[in-house]
Amino acid sequence: MLVSAEEMLKKAKAGKYAVGQFNINNLEWTKSILLTAQECNSPVILGVSEGAGKYMCGYKTVVGMVNGMLEELNITVPVALHLDHGSYEGAKACIEAGFSSIMFDGSHYPIEENVAKTKELVAICKEKGMSIEAEVGSIGGEEDGVVGAGECADPKECKMIADLGVTMLAAGIGNIHGKYPENWAGLSFETLDAVQQLTGDMPLVLHGGTGIPEDMIKKAISLGVSKINVNTECQLSFAEATRKYIEAGKDLEGKGFDPRKLLAPGAEAIKATVKEKMELFGSVGKA
């Protein structure tokens, strides 16, 4: 059964580890991530961007697929199904469809409007036992067509949003989505530290977990980051394994063109990436 991310993240924050949010794009993605979480005995958050939600036919299809898998794969570790970078309308649609967690990204609104909309969604989520993530200061890079340069959030604004009763907070600390450019300045630990000091026990979220060096990830976790989002890295490992399979001509051997065979190396590659991340984040054995 799907659960809110609240308890798993409170435990992570107290235990100085982080829970991975792995974005899903289709059946293979979802199955690989769930099986790896079970194998590693780790809590997990399945992230769904609005674009991926549309691609998978809509949020009800996603909920149906995930709920079916939890039952049929006998998944016993805590699993949250989370809307990633949701608009106000998207958040409402996911609440309706049966998600267990949402992110409302109001970072592009004036702060007053971000506050008003966040407040309203917090009230609905509380009533339904769902967790809610808010964002302050845009995260750089491209996420479903939204491009930002990796800004740092204002710690005072972070406190203002945290005080509205959100479960977790994503604060821009120079991180970006996608591949990091050569001239990337690194994470701003000063910003993270200042945010953590003002927000106390609130679990903090690091977006753009792909390509951040391991020592920086570990330091971020030590400063209160309890949820780390990974998407691009799984896509890259899936693509690489699929390319190798086709370049080796395996799709031309026997029934190698069968999608179950064609997509299997990529699905295995996702598992390996997810396991590596769970080990790095420290969530293995924490379910």
Image (cartoon, helix red, strand yellow):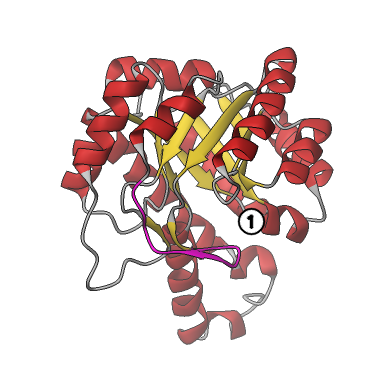
Kindly identify the residue that appears in the image at 49 percent across and 19 percent down.
163
In this rendering, position of residue 17 left or right of residue 218: right
Kindly identify the residue that appears in the image at 68 percent across and 34 percent down.
117
Q: Amino acid at mark 1?
A: Asn
Q: Nearer the viewer, residue 282 or 145?
A: 145
Location of residue 156 by image quarter: top left
Q: Nearer the viewer, residue 159 or 228?
A: 159
Tell me: residue 238, above or below residue 61: below
Task: Confirm whether residue 231 shows in the render.
Answer: yes
Tell me: residue 210, above or below residue 283: below
Per the rendered image, the range of residues in magenta is 142-152
Give the quarter of the figure containing the C terminus: top left
Give the quarter of the figure containing the N terminus: top right
Locate residue 58, reporting x and y percent: 81, 51
Answer whether residue 16 is magenta in the image: no
Answer whether residue 145 is magenta in the image: yes
Q: Which residue in the protein does label 1 denote?
A: 25
Tell me: residue 105, above or below residue 284: below
